[in-house]
Image: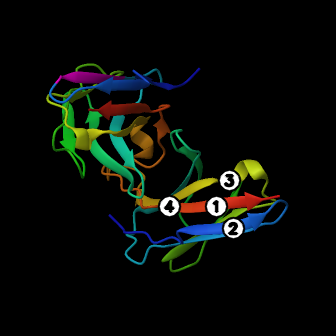
Amino acid sequence: EAQVTQNPRYLITVTGKKLTVTCSQNMNHEYMSWYRQDPGLGLRQIYYSMNVEVTDKGDVPEGYKVSRKEKRNFPLILESPSPNQTSLYFCASSPFSSGANVLTFGAGSRLTVL
Amino acid sequence: LAKTTQPISMDSYEGQEVNITCSHNNIATNDYITWYQQFPSQGPRFIIQGYKTKVTNEVASLFIPADRKSSTLSLPRVSLSDTAVYYCLVGERTGGFKTIFGAGTRLFVKA
């Protein structure tokens, strides 16, 4: 089944403890992206990647890092999480031919930073 | 990137047709219009995409006037399960990799 898989789905952590949210897709998509969703603010783009070793900032990149060493994986790294990074995170991918606007999303990762 | 404006919320009853309009005055020549549906705590799901005139698939229709400054998502005969948030996005089909989701339209379908 074609899908985007995120892990963990739920995580409670403490301020300053580094964590990684993994994202993997099995559709051979070139484009991958991370979003966060907060009540009343909709979906905001954190980082995106057009292909292996090519990443760029979205609208809210502060406090996050990403890497794209393999086509299928696009992990989101929080080096020193803070409470304002408590949010619902979504990873998404799309084929290059459809640009950024026909996205397949993962099920989401709910992160709480205490 | 073209900014989009949608109504914040809409109410409807089961069996009715629902039309959600999105305004995108600064749409560029290469931009496509794409709609997504999102249920609570789930990732958005692609519904339909179009460039001009009318597009129809098994779940919705998309109407785009000649000036392309707005578009209307039409959901025929909605059911309770269509209660969700609907997002309108405007961007290039190739390239244009920064994606902006607006606040979306929260549709509530009542029995």
The residue nearer to you, when weighing B48 against A107, is A107
Location of residue A8 (image quadrant)? top left
Q: Is residue B69 left or right of residue A69?
A: right
Give the labeled residue for mark 3: B83
Give the labeled residue for mark 2: B11
Q: Main secondary structure of the magenta part?
A: strand
Q: Earlier in the sequence, mark 1 or mark 2?
A: 2
Give the Cα distance between marks 1 and 2: 6 Å
Q: Please say whether residue B97 is one of the residues in the magenta stretch.
A: no
Give the Cα distance between marks 4 and 1: 9 Å
Q: Is residue A30 above or below residue A98?
A: above
The residue nearer to you, when weighing A83 against B42, is A83
Q: Which mark is residue B107?
A: 1
Asked if badges 4 and 1 are on one and the same chain, I answer yes
Q: Mark 3 is on which residue type? A: Thr
Q: Is residue A78 above or below residue A60?
A: above
Asked if badges 3 and 2 are on one and the same chain, I answer yes
Please report the bounds of the magenta region as a residue range: A17-22
Q: Earlier in the sequence, mark 3 or mark 1?
A: 3
Residue at figure coordinates x 59%, y 45% from the top left: B39
Q: Secondary structure at mark 4?
A: loop
Give the Cα distance between marks 4 and 2: 14 Å
Asked if badges 4 and 2 are on one and the same chain, I answer yes
Task: Give the image location of residue B94, x and y in percent.
Answer: 38, 49
Q: Residues within 10 Å of mark 1 (few under 14, many from 20)?
A: some
Q: Secondary structure at mark 3?
A: loop
Q: Residues within 10 Å of mark 3 (few under 14, many from 20)?
A: many
**Chain designation of label 4:** B
